[in-house]
Amino acid sequence: MPYSLKAMMAVGAAGAARVKLLLARKFGTLIDYEGNRKKQREGVDLHISPWGDVEIKTDTHTGANFFLEYECSGKPSGVMTSKANWYAYYFVKQGRIYMIPLNDLQKYLKANWKWLTARFTKVVESKAGKARWSAKGLAIPRDYICAAMNVVVYEDYDDRLWLVAGREPRKEVKDDGR
């Protein structure tokens, strides 16, 4: 069954708003790129110190996987094309935000591509009106990613972020030219 683009966009917008609010409360001022088409095409939703550029992903499911889109309509997309420094992956029902270093994630995916795609590829059908398309992604267990790199995990507790795992960056992340 295809997913409605309108419904997916509403979920993403609500999740992004929540993450932006929580990050701003914890770290101070952020630059929101919601209306910046260039940054949005680059897969960047906001900039906040000390993280640098961040792309926000929202998941309303209860599973223990990250869904990492890597192709849409036969072209590279998502995790493979984002120019963000970090993925902020927000699980709504768990109230958790996983801050994943995107450069490390991309290296991990490239080094393990063959077995990851054989085991975890999932195709998602989407629609908007009469238009339909499919995206491919990896539904990878969170434990795999968290064990492979420094993933910083926050819990949304009482409208504040509480660090539950990982190490926060100490300095502003500089643009690495990706």
Image (cartoon, helix red, strand yellow):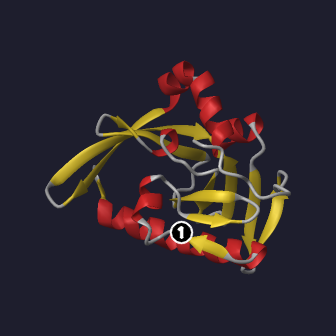
In the picture, which quadrant includes the C terminus?
top right
Residue 15: image location, x then y, percent: 53, 69
**Figure quadrant of residue 130:** bottom left
Residue 93: image location, x then y, percent: 60, 65
Residue 163: image location, x then y, percent: 82, 62
67 displayed left or right of 158: left
Residue 9, can we see it?
Answer: yes
- Extreme-top residue of the structure: 114
Read off the residue under disc 1. Answer: 15
Residue 59: image location, x then y, percent: 53, 58
163 displayed left or right of 141: right
126 displayed left or right of 172: left
- Work out whether 105 lies above or below 34: above
**Figure quadrant of residue 32:** bottom right
**Figure quadrant of residue 127:** bottom left
- At x 74% / y 77%, what residue is drawn? 28
- Work out whether 23 lies above or below 70: below
Instruction: Choose between 105 and 120: the one closer to the eye.
Output: 105
Residue 89, can we see it?
Answer: no
Instruction: Choose between 12 and 29: the one closer to the eye.
Output: 29
- At x 54% / y 68%, what residue is drawn? 16
- Work out whether 124 lies above or below 171: above
Mark 1: which amino acid? Gly
- At x 46% / y 45%, what residue is drawn? 78
